[in-house]
Image: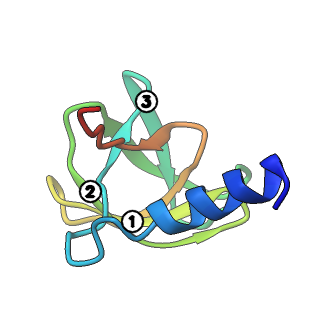
């Protein structure tokens, strides 16, 4: 087995370490991001997603996330540029 193949096999096997854990949460990357009624940037802005807001991601499409802002209850779209997936780190 080549080094690349063994590395890929190791990565594939580690992706299911926590199968019974909830998905990792998303967080707002900037101080605030515009939330919109539809995914394109030309669509109407309906508010701001602040860094402190918690939200649920329902789906992802072409760099956009359809979310529910848990602070306001607003269902809307936010660009993936403004949010990131939290990362769990394991001790080595």
SS class of the residue under badge 3? loop
SS class of the residue under badge 2? strand
Tell me residue 35's x, y (percent).
47, 50
Residue 40 shows up from this direction? no
Residue at which label 1 appears: 67
Residue 23 falls left or right of residue 81: left
In the displayed structure, 82 sits above or below 39; it is above
Q: Disc 3 or 2, which lies upstream in sequence?
A: 3
Tell me residue 18's x, y (percent).
27, 67
Q: CA distance from mark 3 to mark 1?
A: 15 Å
User: 35 or 54: which is nearer to us?
Assistant: 54
Q: Quadrant of residue 68?
A: bottom left
Q: CA distance from mark 2 to mark 1?
A: 6 Å
Between circles 3 and 1, the one closer to the viewer is 3
Determine crowd level at label 1: few under 14, some 14-19, many 20+ residues with C-alpha closer than 10 A. Answer: many
Q: Residue furthest left?
A: 71
Residue at which label 2 appears: 55
Residue 75 falls left or right of residue 10: left
Tell me residue 38's x, y (percent).
60, 67
Residue at which label 3 appears: 29
Tell me residue 86's x, y (percent).
35, 43
Residue drawn at x 70%, y 49% is 41
Tell me, yes or no, whether the two marked residues, 2 and 1, touch with CB atoms within 8 Å: yes
In the displayed structure, 73 sits above or below 87; it is below
Determine crowd level at label 3: few under 14, some 14-19, many 20+ residues with C-alpha closer than 10 A. Answer: some
């Amino acid at each position: 087995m080549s080094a690349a193949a063994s590395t890929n096999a190791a990565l594939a096997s580690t992706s299911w370490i926590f199968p019974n854990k909830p998905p990792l949460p998303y967080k707002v990357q900037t101080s605030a991001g515009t939330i919109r009624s539809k995914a394109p940037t030309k669509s109407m802005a309906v508010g701001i997603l602040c860094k402190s807001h918690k939200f649920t991601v329902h789906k992802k499409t072409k760099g956009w996330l359809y979310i529910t802002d848990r602070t306001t209850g607003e269902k809307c779209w936010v660009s993936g540029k403004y949010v990131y997936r939290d990362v769990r780190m394991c001790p080595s």
